[in-house]
Amino acid sequence: MLFHTQNPLQFAFSQFCEEDSIKLNDETKFGMVGAPFDGTSTYKTGSRFGPRTVREASYNFERYNMVLDKNLDVSLFDFGDIEVIHGNFKKTCHVIQSTISELLDNNFRPVTIGGEHTVSYAVSKALDIENTTVIHFDAHMDLRDDYMGEKYSHATAMRRVFDLNPADMIQIGIRSCSEDENSFAKENHITFFTAHEINKDINNVIKVIKAIEGPLYVSLDIDVLDPAYAPSVSTPSPCGLTPFQLESIIHSLEGKKVVGFDLVEVSSTEIGDITSINGAKSILDFLCIQ
């Protein structure tokens, strides 16, 4: 299966895999894939290396989560990286979509490591998110209808996801947008929490998340964190969330039905970079509450 991937079980998240316990009817069965595509990245490229560096960073963590006082206890299978077509988003989108669809057909819930944020659009297409609430962590709204004449860009990723008509969209950690994006969000009743609002009272966003009913898709752009904690991103923006705040919000997803999770825009290129470390931790935090 998954003929679009390569090197299954080669990288570090393999240490958390429970291959022997995987069953076709297992509701907590997750399939991990990397999507190393950064063909539309602006300012700083390099998120194509995200899947490798995030996996390497996961070596730094234990299965036991001290904050939650529990062990990671899900069936996780790492299928390696999707073979993207660099420089061609449309073909790459098709390959990602078909790969995620195959995961879903085999009862895996997808965990995708980008790559740039356009990856989220391809995954959302496979998930058919019309009845799904999208939880979007990001410094930026990504709601431009086009960017530099391009409809499909990491700067338009959430606008294209919005076009898929999700049940709702909630944006967390926002601190950078155009005037048009701000107006579009308000006119279309997109709920968003700025980093400044969260810094004043994190409980407001946690209450909103806990009140959500129905399936969720979570997209985490690591630049939601302040550059002090995530410097290796395509478009860093100061005054962001702390790892403590991100951890608390992710933990508030406990008990929710999350149909898919992605981590995008990690542009680390070397082992030990704090961006990939915080990215790996966020994935493990998410898996630990399932």
Image (cartoon, rainbow, N blue to C red):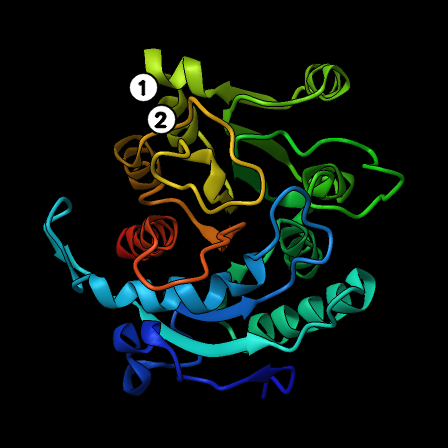
For the residues labelled 1 and 2, say whether their Cβ atoms are less than 8 Å apart.
yes
Q: Amino acid at mark 1?
A: Asn
Looking at the rendered structure, the secondary structure element under dot 1 is helix
- Is residue 237 left or right of 53 when viewed as pictured? right
Please name the residue shown 32% across and 84% down the image: 19
- Is residue 97 left or right of 138 when viewed as pictured? right
In three-dimensional space, the C-alpha distance between marks 1 and 2, rounded to whole angstroms, equals 5 Å
Q: Which residue corresponds to mark 1?
A: 203
Residue sitting nearer the eye, 258 or 275: 275
The number of discs equals 2
Residue sitting nearer the eye, 184 or 242: 242
Examine the rendered structure and indicate whether residue 4 appears above or below residue 46.
Answer: below
Q: Residue 30 at x, y = what percent?
A: 42, 68
Q: Amino acid at mark 2?
A: Ile
Examine the rendered structure and indicate whether residue 205 appears above or below residue 286.
Answer: above
Q: Residues within 10 Å of mark 1 (few under 14, many from 20)?
A: few
Please name the residue shown 16% across and 63% down the image: 62
Q: Residue 127 at x, y = what percent?
A: 64, 58
Q: Residue 70 at x, y = what percent?
A: 13, 55
Q: Which residue corresponds to mark 2?
A: 206
- Is residue 106 left or right of 37 when viewed as pictured? left
Residue sitting nearer the eye, 64 or 210: 64
Q: In which quadrant is the N terminus drawn?
A: bottom right
Looking at the rendered structure, the secondary structure element under dot 2 is helix
Q: Residues within 10 Å of mark 2 (few under 14, many from 20)?
A: some
Q: Point out which mark residue 140 bears.
A: none
Q: In which quadrant is the C terminus drawn?
A: bottom left
Examine the rendered structure and indicate whether residue 223 appears above or below residue 183.
Answer: below
Please name the residue shown 51% across and 45% down the image: 233
